[in-house]
Amino acid sequence: MITLVDVQQAAVRIAGQVRRTPVIRLDAAHSPAQVWLKCEFLQKTGTFKARGAFNRVLGALERGEIDPAVGIAVASGGNAGLANAYAGAQVGVPATVFVPLSSPAVKVAKLRAAGATVIQEGAQYADAFEKAMGFVADTGAGYCHAYDQAEIAAGAGTITLELLEQLDAVDTVLVAVGGGGLVAGIAAALEGRSKVIAVEPENAPSLHAALAAGHPVDVAVSGLAADSLGAQRIGEIGFDVAVRTGVHSVLVSDEQIASARTFLWENYRMALEYGAAAAYAALHAGAYVPAPEERVAVILCGANTDPSGL
């Protein structure tokens, strides 16, 4: 479980390691509500995950939990691996990253360019995770979870502290959900202050299904955003914080995600990966309809995509 205090501590730890990303107001012609786009796709490594990676790696080093000769390990669809490989490289720690065979070539290439040892295993994230845990058991590598670790989630939540400094106030924050680390950090930071709407692909509804069942459950995963939002089960931290803070989930289709991605490229020249476009898709498609005076922020969380498809 994480709280605002954990997010505040993370912000202090990672200060100077990550970028302060800009906020852009959506043109009034595109929404009757007041909508701001938090451009976290401009973060180092191209996604919000750099925040959690630095918080996890620096925290583990402070406690002496990482052997610099062995380094860290992570299972990832690509983005978490890239973030942790980058964080490790910045502090002199090697990284071994396990990714599923479905990971986009652009992400695998970036991982190798960042100096990570990349091992591709299995069809989905769960397969890569199993291999990574075996590697950790055999080598003693420090494990950096893609989303279900307190320091990872708290680091992700530092986006919210920036957002509250950049805007006078915000009523609602829309955030894409895969494994739940980002929504956990954001909801913990906003608890008692603002509403959080989780946006999930219809083909990967990990939090939506868990809220309906009353506990995390396995879901089938497929679709355009599966490489970044393709967790088969919501993390315990994400689920617990979502329930505690009253997060509501809405679903969007692949067609709606693609349409939102195209819209943001054509109108704002934002080159987003499908998972990042999912959050805006909820507004674009009407899955979430804000009140006329509602102040809404949309977290655009990643840009590791092949731009030829825009």
Image (spheres, rainbow, N blue to C red):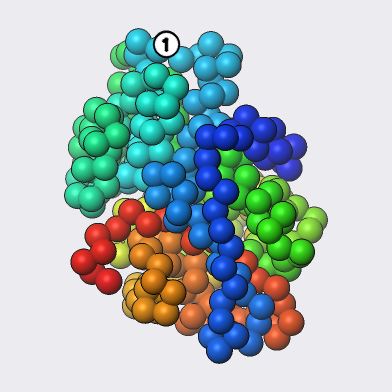
Q: Is residue 31 above or below residue 67?
A: below
Q: Total number of numbered labels? A: 1
Quarter holding residue 224: bottom left
Point out the image quarter for the C terminus.
bottom left
Kind of residue at badge 1: Asp
Q: 245 or 30, which lies in front?
A: 30
The structure residue drawn at horizontal position 71% and vertical position 63%, both measured from the top left corner, is 167
Give the residue at x 34% y 21%: 94
Q: Residue at x 74, y 82 (%)?
A: 293
Does residue 2 appear left or right of residue 23 in this picture? Answer: right
The residue beneath circle 1 is: 67
- The answer, for residue 216, to whether it is visible in the render is no
Which secondary structure, mark 1?
A: loop
Residue 69 lies, in percent from the top left, at 35, 10
Q: Nearer the viewer, residue 47 or 72?
A: 47
Q: Position of residue 255 (x, y in %)?
A: 34, 78
Residue 195: quadrant of the picture: bottom right
Q: Residues within 10 Å of mark 1 (few under 14, many from 20)?
A: some
Q: Is residue 228 left or right of residue 127?
A: right
